[in-house]
Amino acid sequence: MSRIKPLLDVIEDIRSLADSLQAVATALGQSDPEGATAFDPALATPPPAPADPPPKAITLGEVRAVLAEKSHDGYTDQVRGLLQKYGAEKLSGVDPAHYAALLKDAEVLGHAT
């Protein structure tokens, strides 16, 4: 009997919810100036499409971590070459606008065959 009591409570709550929804639908139908009481999906306005979130800004620390790992893995000369490619002798001299491209270039170090 102890398992049935919670189920009966849930059923009662669902019935109560259905009664409340019916009351809301009736109230909306009465306040509709055109007298329409049924929901017409064709008249519903679709929600606006979510905008793509802006790309996450890459920080100097993130770039430094990746380049340090590549250098530790034996690609120090290639890391220096990448920095020079972006017009700098040190990472702090690289324009932050180039961080994404620099990371992309660094990812392929060690993957070339």
Image (cartoon, rainbow, N blue to C red):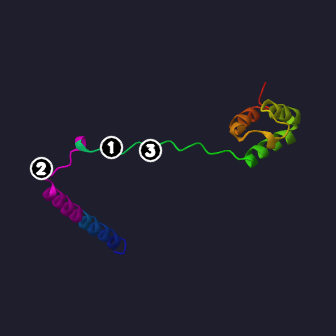
Per the picture, the main secondary structure of the magenta-coloured stretch is helix
Vertical relation: 100 (above or below) 19: above
Distance (Cα) linking label 1 and label 2: 21 Å
Residue 69 placement (x, y as % from top left): 81, 43
Q: Give the amino acid at mark 1.
A: Pro
Q: Are marks 3 and 2 in contact (CB under 8 Å)?
A: no
Point out which mark residue 50 bears. 3
Towards the viewer: 53 or 112: 53
Range of the magenta residues? 18-42
35 magenta-colored: yes
Kindly state the secondary structure of the residue where label 1 is placed: loop
Towards the viewer: 45 or 15: 45
Residue 103 placement (x, y as % from top left): 73, 37
Q: Give the amino acid at mark 3.
A: Pro
Kindly state the secondary structure of the residue where label 3 is placed: loop
Which numbered disc flags the more N-terminal residue, 3 or 2? 2
Distance (Cα) linking label 1 and label 3: 12 Å
Residue under the image location 44 percent in, 44 percent down: 50
Question: Residue tagged by mark 2?
Answer: 34
Which numbered disc flags the more N-terminal residue, 1 or 2? 2
Question: Residue tagged by mark 1?
Answer: 46
7 magenta-colored: no
Q: Give the amino acid at mark 2.
A: Glu
Q: In which quadrant is the N terminus drawn?
A: bottom left
**10 Å crowding of disc 1: few (<14), some (14-19), many (20+):** few
